[in-house]
Image (cartoon, rainbow, N blue to C red):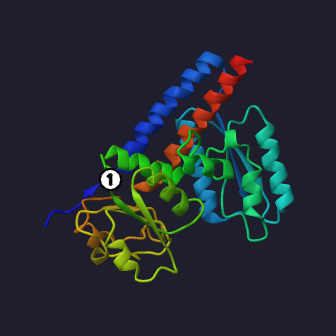
Amino acid sequence: MTQARLMDGTALARRIVEDTARRAAELTARTGVVPCLATVLVGEDPASVTYVRMKQNRCRKAGITSRHVALPASTSTAELVGTLRELSADPTVHGILLQHPVGDHVDERAAFEAIAPEKDVDGVTFASFATMSFGLPGFVSCTPGGILRLLDEYGVELAGKRAVVVGRSAILGKPVGMLLARDATVTYCHSRTRDLSAAVREADIVVAAVGRPRLLRGQDIKPGAVVIDAGYNAGNVGDVDFDSAVERASLITPVPGGVGPMTIATLLEQTVTAAEAAAGGLAAA
């Protein structure tokens, strides 16, 4: 039996970051503007601290300045909103990333909406959701955007395909479904879905984004389907049982090395795009 071909997110992300670094250097040489990404972290969640540090390292490689704002775990919604509004008003900041989770006592949606749409390089505001939904120019949610880039890179045709998204989070499941719906027929599955396996077996494209290790197994996968594992669980385990799914799928993302690198690459690329737009506005003014 032929095994699935691996979708190498690491290699594609490297090319995107190299192109992003070139664009950043050209922008700085032409205008003096250095793209800047501000990261905001509430509390000291170990995983979040690691993610932010990783993003800062990637920024340096791409010629992007990283400004980190660390806030105590006790930060209130009003205080967080104030910080994000200040960053939104700062002309030297081009992109803003609020690392989640932010704590149960904080109104995360209110915080997201304090980010100016033109600096929402993580694609989390209502404005970004609207542009994704309507297929208009704007910033996409980074992991969903990275997934679409991977599908395009590997020549996966969406037209006429049935896509099943397992998960409905506001930062992954819902927006990836909106992006896939540009041509595919999309079904969302979640904790209340009856007979999940039967629904997934109908899919030509499966996106696993639910945060449950090895939830989907080989017998759940339609032979020849494209499997995108956007889950990341303890022990470098995805939401798909890779060893059994690789025997059924035609294309599959590994964990790690599939979706993860694409998320950060998309974030950096959108930060430079925001900086280019801001520099263009200054030139026009």
Residue 121 percent location from the top left of the image: 62, 44
**Residue 236 occupies quadrant:** bottom left
Residue 52 in view of the camera: yes
Q: Residues within 10 Å of mark 1 (few under 14, many from 20)?
A: many
Amino acid residing under circle 1: Met
Query: Residue pushed farthest bottom?
Result: 194
Left or right: 250 in relation to 173: left
Total numbered labels placed on residues in the image: 1
Q: Nearer the viewer, residue 94 or 222?
A: 222
- State the quadrant of the C terminus: top right
SS of the residue under disc 1 = loop
On screen, residue 186 above or below 69: below
On screen, residue 153 above or below 27: below
- State the quadrant of the N terminus: bottom left
Left or right: 237 in relation to 4: right
Residue visible at 39% across and 55% down? 184
Residue 39 percent location from the top left of the image: 68, 48
Residue 55 percent location from the top left of the image: 58, 48
Residue visible at 61% across and 28% down? 276
Q: Nearer the viewer, residue 217 or 260?
A: 217
Residue 135 percent location from the top left of the image: 52, 45
Residue visible at 62% across and 49% down? 130
Residue visible at 33% across and 55% down? 160
Left or right: 216 in relation to 40: left
Residue 254 in view of the camera: no
Left or right: 116 in relation to 225: right
Query: Residue pushed farthest left?
Result: 1
Q: Nearer the viewer, residue 47 or 193?
A: 193
Residue position marked by numbered label 1 in the rendering: 7
